[in-house]
Amino acid sequence: MSIYVDNLSVSLGPRTLSFPRIDLATGSTALLTGPSGCGKSTLLNILSALQPNACGTCQVAGTAVTELRGRAADRFRAENIGMISQTLDLIGYLNAYQNVQLGVQFQSTAKRDKAVQSLDSDALFDRLGLTGANLTGPVSKLSVGQQQRVAVARALAGQPAVILADEPTSALDPESTAAFIQLLLENLDRQRQTLLMVSHDHGLSEFMDHRIEMSTC
Ligand SMILES: Nc1ncnc2c1ncn2[C@@H]1O[C@H](COP(=O)(O)OP(=O)(O)OP(=O)(O)O)[C@@H](O)[C@H]1O
Ligand SMILES: [Mg+2]
């Protein structure tokens, strides 16, 4: 399996957050829903080895992520995780190509060489419908919809096993949301890449293989 979570919890100050059991096969897609503050973003942080003090079982792409620290955690993230955050986290003064290449730079040499060799940014931008955009100017000058597509390109560029998306459609109207999800799903390599997406929009579950509800707060 690609993501396996069991008996997982984390203490944040006086609060302990507990997470539901998750068992996602490689190549599957899941929507993660739950009320604000229940720990959805915290779970994505744990899955991407950004939250080191979690207890329990949390396997991502065959690695026990709660045991990773420092450089090993950074390397794991660079090689296995493609993140699309709500705020996109693009570097505004860099252009689309530079933003996409940045994520790949932190991979180990062997994986990076392979990813760089096979990375065809133009083909990726083309697939994502970005051909008309000014891809050589600062991404901050692109529309929000175009910036979202660059963020998707960056998440896919390193050929990660797992794509984690944290409310990537929260600023979009329903029509744009459906188009964005379709675009993302069409561009996943469904044989390999697993998608876990956080959203408050329960309607998105129709696009996904599974839905995971977090209710405990
Ligand atoms: N570093 C931290 N230290 C202490 N508490 C934290 C920390 N990070 C998050 N929390 C708390 O943990 C809880 C879960 O936060 P989290 O951001 O994971 O929720 P969420 O489900 O993503 O919410 P939202 O839907 O609003 O994005 C919240 O109560 C938050 O205040
Ligand atoms: Mg959140």
Image (cartoon, rainbow, N blue to C red):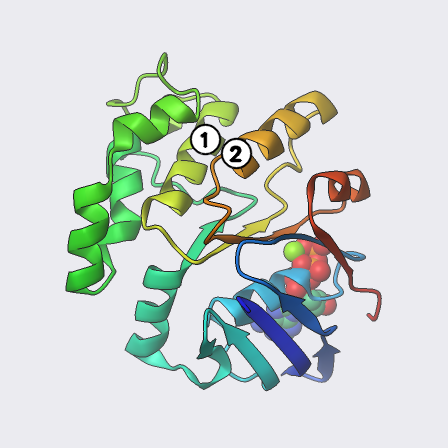
Q: Which residue is mark 1?
A: 149
Give the position of the C terminus as an image quadrant. bottom right
* Amino acid type for the residue under numbered disc 1: Arg
Whether the residue carrying mark 2 lies under 8 Å from ligand 2 is answered with: no
- Residue occupying the point 30% across, 27% down: 123
Q: Quadrant of residue 77?
A: bottom left
Whether residue 184 sits left or right of residue 136 in the image: it is right
Give the position of the N terminus as an image quadrant. bottom right
Q: Position of residue 149 (x, y in %)?
A: 45, 31
Above or below residue 27? Residue 125 is above
User: Secondary structure beneath disc 2?
Assistant: helix
Whether residue 90 sits left or right of residue 214 in the image: it is left
Question: Can residue 176 be seen from the camera position used here?
Answer: yes
Q: How many numbered discs, if any?
A: 2
Q: Which residue is mark 2?
A: 186
- Which of the two discs, 1 and 2, labels the residue nearer the N terminus? 1
- Calculate the distance from the C-alpha at mark 1 to the C-alpha at mark 2: 13 Å
- Residue occupying the point 70% across, 25% down: 173
Above or below residue 38? Residue 94 is above
Q: Position of residue 43 (x, y in %)?
A: 62, 67
Q: Position of residue 61 (x, y in %)?
A: 46, 69
Marker disc for residue 110? none
Q: Quadrant of ligand 2?
A: bottom right
- Residue occupying the point 21% across, 65% down: 108
Contact check, label 1 and label 2, Cβ < 8 Å: no
Q: Quadrant of residue 201?
A: top right
Above or below residue 173? Residue 70 is below
User: Secondary structure beneath disc 1?
Assistant: helix
Q: Nearer the viewer, mark 1 or mark 2?
A: 2
